[in-house]
Image (cartoon, rainbow, N blue to C red):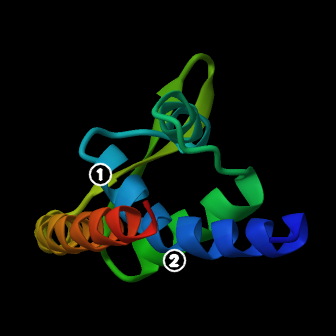
Amino acid sequence: MATAQLDKMRLELRRGVLVLAVLASLKQPHYGYSLRKQLQDGGIDIDEGTLYPLIRRLAEQELLDSEWRQAEGRERRYYQLSELGTTLLSQLTDEWQHLNTALASLLATTSQETQ
């Protein structure tokens, strides 16, 4: 498979899980940079041009609450799951676990067939 094609498929795969990763990370309040750092530390590399529009979109959908706080001598907007966001995270987590189990089964079957 060509590198460009693999990169495109990787991007599509990652795009689908970023919302879940961001929601899961915002159980605790974070401002943009601290959220990005937490995601990176967890193995999910996300650039600012992807993260900040995603945060704004989730806030507009009322999945996140936000507030300005003074921290380290400057004001930062902190985001955290709203009540609706918490409910949605629980539902998406259940869906993710179901899909992951089904996919693991399919991948194991495919792997055994190719051996």
Q: Quarter of the image holding residue 115?
A: bottom left
75 and 35: which is toward the camera? 35
- Residue 49 vs 68, above or below: the answer is below
* Residue 98 placement, left or right of 46: left
Q: Is residue 85 visible?
A: no
Residue 86 horizontal/vertical position (percent) = 15, 63
Residue 23 horizontal/vertical position (percent) = 33, 58
102 and 64: which is toward the camera? 102
Location of the N terminus by quadrant is bottom right
The amino acid at mark 2 is Arg
Residue 107 horizontal/vertical position (percent) = 35, 67
Q: Secondary structure at mark 2?
A: helix
Q: Pick whichever of labels 2 and 1 is earlier in the sequence.
A: 1
Q: Is residue 13 visible?
A: yes
Determine the residue positioned at 65% across, 50% down. Answer: 46
Residue at the limit of the structure toward the bottom, as seen here: 61
* Residue 22 placement, left or right of 63: right
Residue 51 horizontal/vertical position (percent) = 62, 58
Determine the residue positioned at 56% across, 39% down. Answer: 76
Callouts 2 and 1 close, C-beta under 8 Å: no
Determine the residue positioned at 32% across, 77% down. Answer: 62
Report the disc number at residue 85.
Answer: none
Read off the residue under disc 1. Answer: 24
Read off the residue under disc 2. Answer: 57
